[in-house]
Amino acid sequence: MFTIFENRMIVPNVYQMTVHAPDVAQSALPGQFVIFRPEEDGERIPLTLADWDVQAGTVSVVYLNVGRSTAKLASSKAGQTLPTVVGPLGNAMEIDRYGAVLCVGGCYGIGSIYPIARALKAAGNTVVCVLEARSSFLLYWQEKLRAVSDQIVCLTRDGTSGKRGHIGSLAEIIRTLPMRIDRVILNGCNYLMMRGSQETLPLKIKTIVTLNTLMIDGTGMCGVCRVSVNSETKFACVHGPHFDGHQVDWAEVTQRRKAYLQEEVIPLRTTQPL
């Protein structure tokens, strides 16, 4: 059993959970993910690592409350335990000295982009972070990201913080930056990564996305997370989760992500307690 140190809502419907899992913390690398299970017979939830502390033996994730399983996770309190914390899983993000890297995060992706930005900065890159949200009240971790980057750009649809716009403004933002961007890393919902990849394609900038596909075991055995990349079938959990955003079949990813939307919502409409 894994003890919960902290679990709180940091912005509406987005939660940060820190769990004692020393073996996972000891081996964690930027871009890897873990699988949480909120109850003994519950669903396995894949979540990208947002931070970890080797000395304290803790790992942190940022997640969105969207269905019964994440609602159960969100209702957990500090001091309670989780029956399953598996990881680290997946390949680490490729970290090298590229020059100037644009890290884009939206929703839960703001949290999971943090260790990647930190590692890129430590490797000697110029790091620019773009934080995208509908409004300023949905932004978080600005200070944490500012500490590991050279510039922060906030992008809100209503213009309440930073620039007014959305992910479709990414090419415009890149053109206005004082440096040439050598690589773009996108992390967040599928639409953000798909639209962001479309923006960088004509600019011919290498763009890496972290696919959040449906998963079960997270070790390549079930095949649920299969995606098409450059017309080849890949398993996101073992071949990824990081892929070239210009080579992903986004129509297929979007269709497969919608497969269980109704099943996720139906339990929340009942009066049964979680």
Image (tube, grey):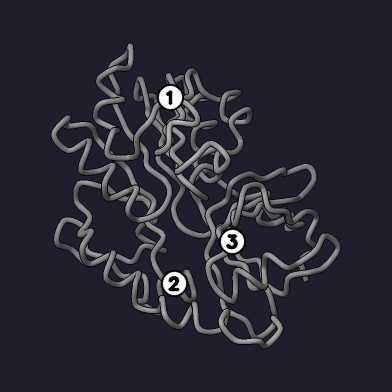
SS of the residue under disc 2:
loop
Residue 24, placed above or below residue 43: above
Residue that label 1 marks: 128
Q: Residue at x 24, y 30 (%)?
A: 171
Kindly identify the residue that appears in the image at 27 percent across and 39 percent down.
168
Dot 3, how many residues are within 10 Å of its Cα: few (below 14), some (14-19), or many (20+)? many
What residue is drawn where x is 43% and y is 43%? 93
- For badge 1, the amino acid type reads Val
Q: Residue furthest right?
A: 79
Q: Which of 26 and 79 lies nearest the eye of the viewer?
A: 79
N-term mark: 1 or 2: 1
Q: Are marks 1 and 2 in contact (CB under 8 Å)?
A: no
Q: Which mark is residue 21?
A: none
Please state which of residues 217 and 132 is positioned toward the viewer in this rendering.
132
Gap between marks 1 and 2 measured at Cα:
31 Å
Q: Is residue 89 left or right of residue 104?
A: right
Q: Amino acid at mark 2?
A: Met
Of labels 1 and 2, the one closer to you: 1
Residue 244 vs 266, above or below: the answer is above
Mark 2–mark 3 Cα distance, whole angstroms, equals 14 Å
Say what amino acid the circle numbered 3 marks: Gly
Residue at the spot of label 2: 215
Task: Please give the residue where the numbered disc 3 appears in the rendered image.
Answer: 87
